[in-house]
Image (cartoon, grey):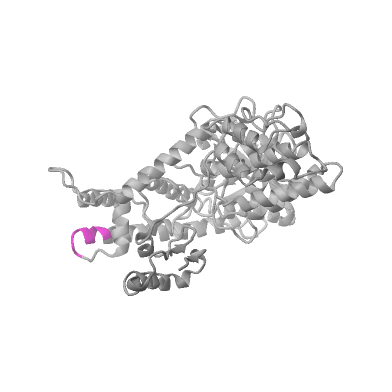
Amino acid sequence: MGDLNEQNCHLVKSWMPELERQVARLRTEGEPDLHSSFRLWLTSMPSPHFPVAVLQSGIKVTMESPKGVRAALLRCYATLSPTLLAQGCPHQPQAWPRMLFVLAFFHALVLERRKYGSLGWNTSYDFSDGDWLCARQTLSMFLNTQAAIPWAALQYVTGQINYGGRVTDDNDRVLLTHLLPRCYTPAALTPHFTPAQGYPLPAADASLEACISHIQGLPAVDTASVFSMHPNADTTFQLQESERLISTVLSVQPRMSHTAGAVSNDDMVASVAQDALANLPAPLVREDASIARDPFAPLPTGAVNSLGVVLGQELERYNCLLHHVSASLQQLAKALKGLVAMSSSLEAMYTSLLNNQVPRQWAQVAYPSLKPLGPWLKDLQDRVAFFGSWLKRGPPNCFWLAACFFPQGLLTAVLQNHARLTQMPIDQLSFGFEVLHIEDALQLAAPPEVGVCVSGLHLEGARWSTELGTVAQPEPGSMTSALPLVHFRPQQGPGPGSQHGGSTNSVYSCPLYQTSARSGTLNSTGQSTNFVLHMDLHIPANTVPADWVLQGVAALCSVNQ
């Protein structure tokens, strides 16, 4: 009697209920007729559609990717044979083992950068052993067919096709193109080359057993410097692990409190809902617009004021959000008093308020934000106050970009107004950037003659040095740092990011995101909806743009706290 092996069950979502019925029938009706040696094997990726009953009724074996550069290298070399290592490239016998090791090291880097979250990759990609196999075959092909190693072709095929085929985010692709040259470089053929400090290459004539022994002697714990990242990245990783643990604990803790004299959960939620409702801003009414400085007034040329259009759209979005928050809080208050039924949506909202989290039904109609409930409500008040000031006092001297639901809309409106005032084609306009020596928007006496000043931006993975006027390494333990005011100045010509990673060695084309999550839904341009634009920031003379790309430096509209 043989076994039955059903592979990749996660690919057939519609068949999962039938699988559950078949397994249940085997355990009940078919059990007397089953041979004692019969086994049913099922393979699947983690999937919410896989039947829980099937998981509970069988023995589960999980296969996880190795953690750590050393473990990833050992897994790569476990797929090799002594013959392949010794005779895999007869035309380049000296280069083959060294190039094979640096390729395995690159494979380990792309795997392990995922643990740093958005600092490592904007999107977590499922790089697999298949990518390593394809890249290894590509390396063998180039070495066996070319008299001299074609470094540019090798980097392009490996980085843009073998591994880049999985990468969907353009900024992640830029990172990949800067990461691979650390390994695929002519220096890899020199005797004392190391792809990272503490990771020397094995001897060129080492056997497979000697290579594995060499890898086992490498550091067991990887520091951020191995990935060309700042030590603060390790702190970020630890904070993410802690938040994940706390989130798991909150999800499984009991709802009821049994401590004598303690405040009940219902009282806690009712108090939070009452305070939130009392401090909720009033809706913004378009009729309250300033007469002397009408924000909706046409431009001097008589053309439509695009900034006024953006203001009107933002007012509608915030009024919708305020109405949704107010109505749901009132319904929850009635449900806690027993006046209305506690629906599933109110139940989810109850749990979120109890855990100091933003309810999902609010987040679905709100702007992107990763703040907990308390800071989120305070942030909502500040945002509404900013647009209220814009409405009643006219356009501000400095714009708070993060206050917008859609920051790209505000920046596009600035370009549109400039195009209408100067009669320039808008498709030939882009932004130039100047970081000012002004920390607070209130210190700005007047708006710039061209473009707008923007406040509220932050740098993640770096800081801004006002003394040097450049990006600088962050302070120890500082995850983010505030940027001074930035002048967004419309100009004619291509904008930052057109050359991916900096147009010159003195400028870093820094991506700007709405939140630190960085990932989002891909739009029709291939960019994440979380992505706003690239900003040209000056960097120290002793660095190059690739240093800051590998460090994961980005600008943020909104921080998590």
x, y percent for residue 309: 56, 59
Q: Relative to the observer, which residue lies in front, 179 or 409?
A: 179
The residue that appears at 56% across and 55% down in the rendered structure is: 529
Q: Quadrant of the N terminus?
A: bottom left
Marker count (numbered): 0
In the image, residue 191 lies in the stretch drawn in magenta:
no
Q: Is residue 441 left or right of residue 196?
A: left
Q: Relative to the observer, which residue lies in front, 274 or 195?
A: 195
x, y percent for residue 518: 54, 48
Q: In this view, does 427 lie to the left or right of 259?
A: right
Res 120 quadrant in image:
top right
Overall secondary structure of the magenta stretch?
Answer: helix
x, y percent for residue 112: 56, 41
Q: Relative to the observer, which residue lies in front, 18 or 550?
A: 18
Q: Is residue 384 left or right of residue 415?
A: left
In the image, residue 338 lies in the stretch drawn in magenta:
yes
Q: Give the range drawn in magenta.
A: 332-339
The residue that appears at 44% across and 53% down in the rendered structure is: 61
The residue that appears at 77% across and 37% down in the rendered structure is: 95
